[in-house]
Amino acid sequence: MRKLIESTIVSLDGIVESPDGWAVFDAEAIQYAMNELDKYDAFVMGRVTYERLRAIWESATGNPYIDAINRMPKHVATRTLRSLGWNATPLGDDVTSELLRLKTQPGKDLIKYGTSRLDATLLAAGLVDEIRLWIMPVVIGTGQRIFEDIDPATARLDLAGVHRFSNGSVILTYTPCHTAPDPGP
């Protein structure tokens, strides 16, 4: 079964909003991102992320990373958009059933960029296999915070891996924990 990987850029103070304005990618980070992108053959996005990334990347050319993203199919959770461009299709009214169907199809893993209200649905349904937090060594101060729309009961996570970069950023990989919390003493 294919995995659904949630990947999010986050500042040290937990901000996820508008990382294109503050996230720094040096040659090492770009190479890592390109290697990771080869592991996926489709994107899953909420409507807001879809509209934002489409506006930034759809007309961009000449960057191998963006060119690869532009070619990939995208599956968008939306109740409002009637027609989609940028190689995208809507997930339909039953997002969880459609994502389960996509996960059971042959192919590479699915990638989802950005945290959003959609994550609450996906985590509650047990559809997220990994959450990767690419933590940038910057403090932003204000903006949308990570897991803002997530019920803490559905966000119990186990650390599965750490990748360090020479620029000070790290990727923390977590897997959702599907066991009941320890009530303690």
Image: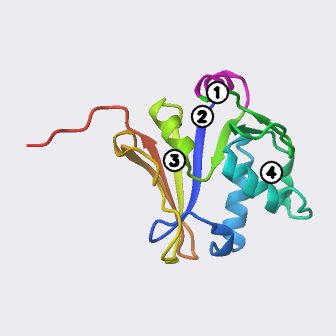
Please tell me whether residue 7 is drawn above or below residue 4 in the rendered image.
below
Please tell me whether residue 93 is drawn above or below residue 175 in the rendered image.
above
- Give the mark, 4 or 2, whose residue is nearer the N terminus: 2
**Magenta span: helix, strand or loop, mainly?**
helix
Q: Which mark is residue 69?
A: 4
Q: Position of residue 138 (x, y in %)?
A: 52, 77
Q: Position of residue 44 (x, y in %)?
A: 68, 40
Q: CA distance from mark 3 to mark 1?
A: 16 Å
The residue identified by callout 3 is: 131
Q: Residue at x 25, y 38 (%)?
A: 181
- Check disc 1 and report its element: helix, strand or loop: helix
- Give the mark, 3 or 1, whose residue is nearer the N terminus: 1
Give the amino acid type for the residue marked by disc 2 in the picture.
Answer: Lys
Q: CA distance from mark 2 to mark 1?
A: 6 Å
Q: CA distance from mark 1 to mark 4?
A: 19 Å
Contact (Cβ within 8 Å) of mark 4 with mark 3: no
Q: CA distance from mark 3 to mark 2?
A: 11 Å
Is 158 contained in the magenta span?
A: no
Q: Residue at x 90, y 60 (%)?
A: 59
The N terminus - image quarter: top right
Q: Which mark is residue 103?
A: 1
- From the image, state whether disc 4 or disc 2 is nearer to you: 4
Give the amino acid type for the residue marked by disc 1 in the picture.
Answer: Lys
The residue identified by callout 2 is: 3
Q: Which residues lie in the magenta part?
A: 96-107
Contact (Cβ within 8 Å) of mark 3 with mark 2: no
Give the amino acid type for the residue marked by disc 4 in the picture.
Answer: Ile
- Check disc 2 and report its element: helix, strand or loop: loop
Contact (Cβ within 8 Å) of mark 2 with mark 1: yes
Q: Is residue 135 left or right of residue 151?
A: right
